[in-house]
Image (cartoon, rainbow, N blue to C red):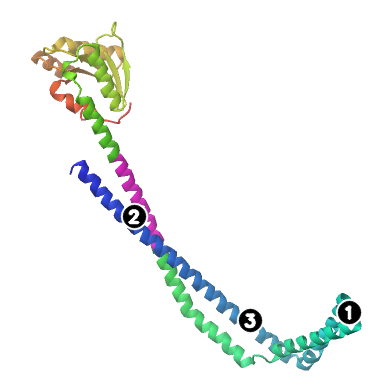
Amino acid sequence: MDRAEQLQRLHSERDDVESELRNASRRHTDSAKRIARLRAEQNRLRRRGDAAQRLLRVRQWIKRHRLTEVVLIVGPFAAFVFGSVLGYAFIGGVPAAVLAAVISLTVGLGAVLVLLYRPDSDRLSTVDQESTRAMAPLLQTLEAETIEASKIADSLRSLKARKQELDQAHAELRHLESRQHQSQQIFSENWKGMRGAEFEDYLARVFTHLGYRVDRTGNSGDQGVDLVVHASGQKIAIQAKGYVSSVGNAAVQQAFAGMMFYGCDQCAVITNSRFTASAKELAVSTRCLLIGEDQMRDLVFGSIFHAGQHG
């Protein structure tokens, strides 16, 4: 599968994941709203049942202590006195106090009647039972909705993680595509016709493009090494040979000596030409890597020294 097909597949899969994310987010929001409504109904039923229970307990306490008549008398009388005092204190004058007292008496009498008789106790018991019965299926529905919301939340987390993976893969593929484009531009240069320092500069740019640190040794006293490349945790001594004719074993000897001098882990001779048979034979015994014109494309595109492995 080429990069264009990979990008198309990633785009398609990412679109699918984003669509699933939107649907899951919408379902999660709807579920949260349903749970909120169910909990509001649960609180309403609980308040309704608790209010009925409290009123029943108050009535039972009053009846148990035979205080019905006392409440009927004391309640309105207390409201009458309280209203008259407030009316006289805040409004002023006897007529205002009497009016406030009458209003308070009426309200107090109504409150006492409600406390004792309305609704009747049987109805209050029925309200409490109805609230209890309605609570059971409501709790079951709430539990099922909560479990479903948890599943949706898990699905959301999974989809978000998958989207992050796809975004990262897409970014990496784009980066690789950009690097490959840059590699093609570098390889398209006339490296075959380069000589001396020009070829050294070209190789330095290649290794920098691949993500490595490159040290130049200088033109004199380089001990047979033109570049020291820090790659994959190792130091590699590079002998650059921009030649027309084939490169002989002297270059291999120089690269090997330079490797020892600079304390490198590996040595290589890179040329835009070819190698003689004796050079190849010596490279085997010294473990010197030879890269000629036939391997130049692999070098530039990172197939020999893998791109991105910094030393």
The magenta-colored residue range is: 152-172
Question: Which mark is on residue 51?
Answer: 3
Q: Earlier in the sequence, mark 3 or mark 1?
A: 3
Cα–Cα span, label 2 and label 3: 49 Å
Q: Against 32, is 52 above or below?
A: below
Q: CA distance from mark 3 to mark 1?
A: 35 Å
Please identify the residue farthest to the right as the structure is shown.
Answer: 93
Say which residue appears at 14% left-offset and 11% top-offset. Answer: 249
Crowd tier of the residue under label 2, counting other residues whose Cα lies within 10 Å: few below 14, some 14–19, many 20 or above: some
Which marked residue is nearer to the observer: mark 3 or mark 1?
1
Q: Which residue is mark 2?
A: 18
Q: Secondary structure at mark 3?
A: helix
Label annotation for residue 88 = 1
Q: Position of residue 200 (x, y in %)?
A: 25, 15
Q: Nearer the viewer, mark 2 or mark 3?
A: 2
Q: Amino acid at mark 2?
A: Glu
Quarter occupied by the C terminus? top left
Give 221 or 166, whichever is nearer the viewer.
166
Question: Is 111 rendered above or below residue 196?
Answer: below
Main SS category, magenta section: helix
Q: Residue at x 61, y 93 (%)?
A: 122
Residue 301 can be seen in this image: no
**Residue 87: quadrant of the picture:** bottom right
Q: Please, what secondary structure does the residue beneath circle 2 have?
A: helix
